[in-house]
Amino acid sequence: MMMPTLATAQPGALEKLIFGPKLPASEPAAMADGLFMMITWFSVFFFVVLMGLMFYFMIKYRRREGVPTEPSPHHNTLLEIFWTVVPSSSLLVMFVLGFQGYTQQIVSPSDAMELRIEGNKWNWLATYPNGASSPEFQPLSRKVIESADGMSSSTIKGRDYPIFYLPENTSVKFRMNSQDVIHSFWIPEFRVKRDVIPNRYTTYGIKTPRLTAADTYIHQETGEEMLGRDMWVFCAEYCGDEHSRMAATLRIVPQDYFNQLMEDWGVTGLPWEEGEKIYKQMCASCHLIDGGKLVGPPWNESSDANGQYGWGYPVSLESGGTAERDANYYRESILDPNAKIVKGYAPQMQSYQGQLDEDDINNIIAFIQTLSEVPPNPHLEGEGGESESEAGNQAEEAAGSES
Amino acid sequence: MSTLDAHAGHHEEGSYLSGPPGIMAKVWQWATTVDHKKIGVMYLFAVLFMFFVGGMAALLVRYELIDPMREVLVQTVDANGDIIETTATQGENLKDLFEGLGMHEDLTGTQIYNRAFTLHGAVMVFMFIVPSIPASLGNFFLPVMLGAKDVAFPRLNLLSWYIYLFGSTFGILSILMGGVDTGWTFYTPYSTTTDADHWRVVLMVTAAFILGFSSILTGLNFVVTVHKLRAPGMGWFDMPLFIWAVYATSIIQVLATPVIGITLLLLIFERIMNIGIFDPAMGGDPVLYQHFFWFYSHPVVYVMILPAMGIISELLAVHARKHIFGYRAIAFSSLGIAGVSFLVWGHHIFTAMGELAAVLFSGLTFLVAIPTAIKVFNWIATLYKGSIVLNTPMCYGLMFLFTFSIGGLTGLPLATLATDLHLHDSYFVVAHFHYVMMGGTVIAFLGGIHHWWPKMFGKMYNEPGALIGMALVFIGFNVTFFTQFFLGTQGMPRRYANYVDEFQTLHQISTYGSWILGLGMFVHLAVFIHSLVAGEKAPANPWGGLTLEWECESPPIEHNFHHEPIVKHGPYDFETTVPPHWDPKDYPIHPDAGKATH
């Protein structure tokens, strides 16, 4: 089946009616739209056939006094098999295409830039790889109405929302968690969302589009028209009073401009440097970073008879089986150390719940990532929403075998 | 086999509606009755009242959404040339409305909206749509259609009615105390932490917990009744399809409802005793709640729709005077839907679960589409060569095919993973389930009420009036909800009190539609009241039906039948059988009848 892609698709009038004037922002988003249109045409076809028959029968076989009903069969096995098999096989096609599109939509390549997303009631906060976060805000809408005599003006505006900048044509992976209740990070133009859950990381990846000359936005402070593309981020999981005001603007800008912003917003300590400080204070008495064995397993890339160590490598568990050393694994090991015990080690670590905050945990993870050759996002897939990373692995293999 | 005429000489047995003289004696008689018909009628009025409450909440929700909330900064230049700034808010419609009434002055506009949509959802799901068809029409007609005097356990039936009242009392208490803002799904950890110093959430959850028992007992009663109380001569495949549908529903109710009971109990424990089950701050897992919740709440979707499908089978067959096409396929697809319904709960959690699980649940979800599609095909085929009369019940039957098909087909992009990532928790979902729940269940319920109204109350309703109501409901419903598909695909999240400017036009159209829909419902209410007060007396069999309820008087006597009926023909043998209490001259049988019927 030919799926329309960004390169080939010029949305028709129907697509514009359905999805609004904004084009899908990535290849997988365009594919999802194509699949949606395919399902829509399938549905329209069946609906028209069924309703056509219904209205035809309604008129043709309307009741006329004294005219008996004509006998007709009470069932027809062939016909019934036909109308079971045909829709079933169409559904199978939808399922398979939906599965393929799904893996592409949540995948992030290994060199993706990681953006940390934190949700809390009722704000989004994004943290860039260098530890900076965006200080810019703009209102939801702004209309100025001047009175006829020019003596007064009304400014109608919504609440201020943060602006998250991303460079164009770049793979980005969101690593998300929530500070309180469940939220959901939805970027309609990428046609994807994923729930943001407390005490757990969830992830998905996007590829930002290339900018064209037509992509411009008005800068919220200078009023200047600049090259870039604004899109909405909404919270899609009900989270209380101001749920409907939990939004943000995602702004795709040229790489140079993005680099400039990162420099301007630079923070005093880089995450991995902060993580190293915490390591020296709190962790170094049990964990080495030169491959040596103390009370706990080493953090750097190394190996011994029990298996490999270091970010991105699978861990053999004392209880049997393996787990993936990803962000969720390290997070759990810090907060609930006895949940997974590395083979050859004893459950001796105390929980650091309450002693280390979200930023600390993130800084430690950033530091651990620097100790391994495996890039921060070693997998085709994200870590998956659930702690069973086996589920993620299998889906990943399936995805890998198809690509 | 006319049971009416054969007993003209017998002593007079009054209708079930005639009671002892005196208001108090009547009230006492109804309050202590074990007659399934009286219990069914009490349920009918109770669920219709709840539909009114939930519907009013829906109109409030739509009223708020007619425009977005905005802050307005007004700058005026005064005589001295100084700029005076004042701020105000606009678009907080519900807050303005309630302030006018002197209510909820301490709440913000979004808080009032959140309570309104929760009220709408919780009342509609737990107090209206789950008990709606089985408890009212099911209670009244399941024993009659089986040829029984009553359900298997009449006293248990009365108990489940009082449990329903008791549970609803908790819900109404919670609403009167100010309502809850959790959404009807009570997702943790929001539901375990919101409104922490107050009992309202616990009361509402308790209401849902208690109402579950009412469901279980009714379901149990129906299952036993179907197994044990069928009239002589009625095999399993001679049962009307409405019975098959209610039977499948009852099985789901008995098996699934205990799970929600346990889940809600855990939720109450967590709130009151701070036991960490779902709240991660106490070491719990919030997504676990969603699994528990939907393990019940997905099968319950079929508790809502299966009885509606049963009604449609009756309406189409009777008003087209046609044998239902593919009787066994329809009967077995009811059971098939009931079985698969237990395996698809995960599709409510696609965006919060691992990849492998999401893929599995997507595949399973497609399975449930197949028996549903088969039913629709069979219904359309039933109309072929029929004798179709476009009265209100039939129009609702045909409307069901229209709206339910849209509801079913728009489920496809939600089951497809790649498209669901966009549509999940958007207005597309809202539109989809309203097309299924309202366009399916409520439309069939309205059709069923009109179909059986003469039997239940012994009075005809005003046909032109009801048709006007029907037309308004059809137009209003589609204007309200079809627009919401576009809102969803364009990026409007659900449960939003507020939205960005580009969505306003579609929201306005949807709100106008809700007013037309509301008007249609009030027309129906007026027609019903008119019928009860001044309706023409109904004959025993106004539509020419062949199922056993049309052999009773209208309204039926207390024990339904003067003599135990013996079943000699199938429920849909319209081509070969003249219906009871019907003049053969008015009901010609085709000379070829019986030849080509298999």
Image (cartoon, rainbow, N blue to C red):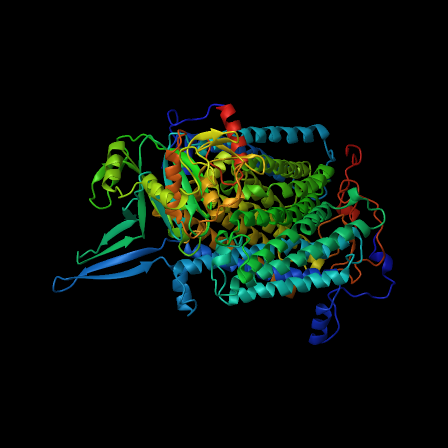
Q: Nearer the viewer, residue B334 or A261?
A: A261
From what the image shows, is residue A198 above or below residue B37? above
The front one of B400 and B54 is B54
Find residue A185 and report its horizontal and vertical position in percent: 42, 43
Image check: B209 left or right of B81? right
Q: Is residue B598 left or right of residue A222?
A: right
Question: Where A47 falls versus A402 (above or below)?
Answer: below
Image quadrant where residue A216 sits:
top left
For residue B411, side relative to residue A29 (left or right): right
- What percent of the width, then of the height, locates residue B269? 57, 59
Image point (20%, 55%), residue name: A148
Residue B419 pos. (x, y %): 48, 36
Camera sees residue A380: no
The one of A134 and B76 positioned closer to us in this rendering:
A134
| Residue depicted at x 58% and y 45% | B399
The answer to whether residue A352 is visible is yes
